[in-house]
Image: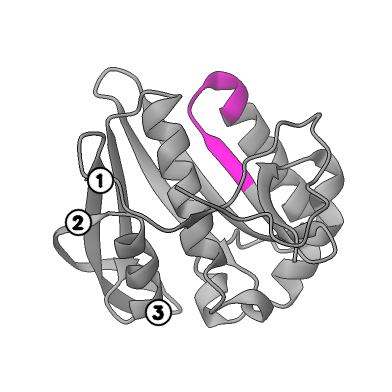
Amino acid sequence: MVEFLRRWRRDDVGALADIYARADTDLLSNIPDDRSPAGAQAWLDRIRSAEDEGTAAAYAIVAGDLTPVGNVMATAIEQRHSTAWISYWLDPSVRSHGLAAAGLRSLVDRLHDELDVYRLELGYRVDNPASGGVAKSAGFAVEGRERERLLYDGFRFDTVVCARLCGDQRVSGTRLPILASSTPPPDDGDSAVSR
């Protein structure tokens, strides 16, 4: 299967709206409240604007028929302290195949090596061990727990907070290639690379 990361494009609005329409409970907590095509377009516009400002780096996880199936991104990239907030999600139909972990490892490498972001931070609900496994597989260390940090559907959830520093030991594992916008997708059946 062809798998890689690329920047989100304006013509991804239909694929993004389709993912929103299939969202399960876990995905609903990671996507905008407006899940219409107009909401998908607004999200894409916000991400592209933040990338232009240098405060975000967002990549579509692409697999199968070359349409997006997920997202890995850094937001709130801050230069003075060299920090960023990390998030990731997958369409429910492609979970449990290591795509989020491979995509996150690729994003981490890019942020540390090419964008010179020193500290990467993320958080996940304590009742979401799959998200915790993705974070651990990319070398994030647990730093603590925030009590009742998140509110979804009237319920509050504790959050595990994690960070990864530029000097932390690199983790092994599959990475997804990050394509330049002008680069055609790989045509072989095994595009994932290890580092």
| Residue at x 76%, y 62% (from the top left corner) | 189
In the figure, is residue 193 to the left or right of 111?
right
Q: Which mark is residue 129?
A: none
Give the residue type that dot 1 points to. Answer: Arg
Q: Earlier in the sequence, mark 2 or mark 3?
A: 2
The quadrant holding residue 48 is top right
Circle 1 sits on which residue? 164
Dot 2: element:
strand
Marks 2 and 3: CB-CB under 8 Å? no
In the figure, is residue 45 to the left or right of 165?
right
In magenta stretch: residue 55: yes
Circle 3 sits on which residue? 154
Please determine whether, in this image, residue 77 is positioned above or below residue 107: above
Give the residue type that dot 2 points to. Answer: Ala
| Residue at x 58%, y 51% (from the top left corner) | 176
Question: In the image, which is nearer the foreground, mark 2 or mark 3?
Answer: 2
Give the residue type that dot 3 points to. Answer: Gly
x, y percentage for residue 146? 17, 63
Please determine whether, in this image, residue 25 is positioned above or below residue 89: below
Question: In the image, which is nearer the foreground, mark 3 or mark 1?
Answer: 1
Mark pair 2, 3: CA separation: 29 Å
What residue range appears in magenta?
51-59
Mark pair 2, 1: CA separation: 6 Å
Marks 2 and 1: CB-CB under 8 Å? yes
x, y percentage for residue 153? 46, 79
Circle 2 sits on which residue? 141
* Residue 20 seen from this side: yes
